[in-house]
Amino acid sequence: MKFRSYPAVLDFLYHNLPMFQRQGAPAMKKDLSNIMKLCDHLGNPQDQFTAIHVAGTNGKGSTCHILSALLQSQGYTVGLYSSPHYKDFRERIKINNQLISKDFIITFINDNLEIINAIKPSFFEITVALAFKYFANQNPDFVIVEVGLGGRLDSTNIITPLLSIITNISKDHVQFLGDTLPLIASEKAGIIKHNVPVIIGEKQKETIPVFEEKAESMGSQLWYAEEQVNIIVDEDRIELAYAQKKITCRLDWFSDYQVYNLRTAWAAFSYVMDGKIQLLKASKFLEQMPQKTYFLGRWMQLAERPTIIAESAHNAAGLKIVMKKLSSLSYNKLFMVMGFSSDKDLASVIDLFPSHAQYLWAKANIPRGMHAPYLETFARIHGLKGKSYSSVRRAFAAAKKMAGKDDLIYIGGSIFVVAEVL
């Protein structure tokens, strides 16, 4: 059997390979054997490009995209592997702001159907193998690889990178990674390789011993981004200071919670460039980061009057920062179109949401989505007023119908909820 079209390939990937984003735990593979078999079959493409590996609970995607823009600003071509995607599967694999071609995906799957059918990899495993083969073929100057989940057993963890980055640690996916910060940090620290430097995005008391012990055991130099880079935010003006140098820029896409990600990305950028940075070009590319890197889903303003904001934060640490940002905005009424994955610990996040908002609960169009009537009942018990809807699109349409020009509509709770309104 050979696939003749891109839609046919996508149908095969989505419906024949176990997919964590859709199915949850049943799609998880607990070792690296499949990805190693796949890449060995492909000629070990993971060894054929210069990689930067990025793990962490929150901020991985933003850090990867900011770092990509910064490296592009210096004239480099930059590959980026990230997950999940919002609208198009090809968002996961791109070079600069160009998505992988449909033809390459079709050819790759057709050429490797025999081994796919033999070892039955997960959706994530075959996607990682596809990405690695594409980057090996295209030969960009750098490839930024975002960890999917955890680190130690993530399929991306067969690379030996130029630099490792761990953005931060908070409680998420505790059923897989552990229910304490040190346990989760230990899984994330699994990406630290022998003699490969590592940058930690946030210095947290509970995780310092884990990272420092792992780095020492691997003979790897460790830095904390906050000790390398200082950022001052003055309304829309961002001043970034490092190594006795300063850069000032105005970033339309910037929100307060991006301070950590920008600082981490700049620390990594400075290391890769060995301090030899063309600052004016870096500033220009930072300002254009979303356009230069195909960046979606993070504090995206979709419309004005009413203001419509889509945001993918979905765990307690991320939502706490985003809800603080939301509370700083001016509006008449607030409408929240919200949905979560079924494995989300609602008790850990429900108290973060504003009690004065009108909630429109919806299930994302994936099997793993949490049912809206359950959300409505749970939220009402915790003092949040609202109604459940049969789909995200209907909830969003209802919010737009109810909202006046001076109101605000927020869409979030899950990447998959946001994806349906973009």
Image (cartoon, grey):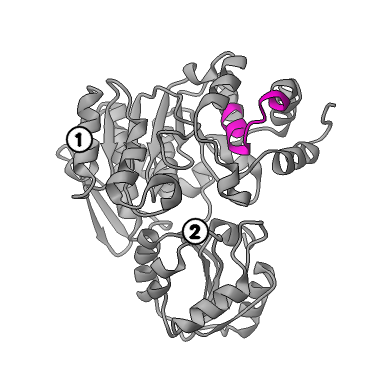
Q: Which mark is on residue 212?
A: 1
In the image, residue 163 lies at what x, y percent? 33, 28
Q: Dot 1 lies on which element?
A: helix
User: Crowding near pointer 1: few (<14 within 10 Å), some, many (20+)?
Assistant: some
User: Crowding near pointer 2: few (<14 within 10 Å), some, many (20+)?
Assistant: many
Say if 417 sits above or below 354 in the image: above
In the image, residue 187 lies at what x, y percent? 36, 39
- Residues in magenta, as a range: 116-129
Residue for point 61% across, 61% down: 369
Say if 336 sits above or below 245 in the image: below
Q: Is residue 123 magenta?
A: yes
Type of amino acid under label 2: Ser
User: Which residue is tagged 2?
Assistant: 312
Outermost residue to the top = 43
Instruction: Give left or right: position of 192 versus 347.
Output: left
Residue for point 32% across, 29% down: 192
Query: In which quadrant of the rendered image does the N terminus lie?
Result: top right
Counting residues from the N terminus, which is met first, the one under dot 1 or under dot 2? 1
The answer to which image quadrant residue 193 occupies is top left
Q: Dot 2 lies on which element?
A: loop
Residue for point 70% across, 23% down: 118
Note whether residue 388 is visible. yes
Say if 390 sits above or below 64 in the image: below
Please count the marks in the image.
2
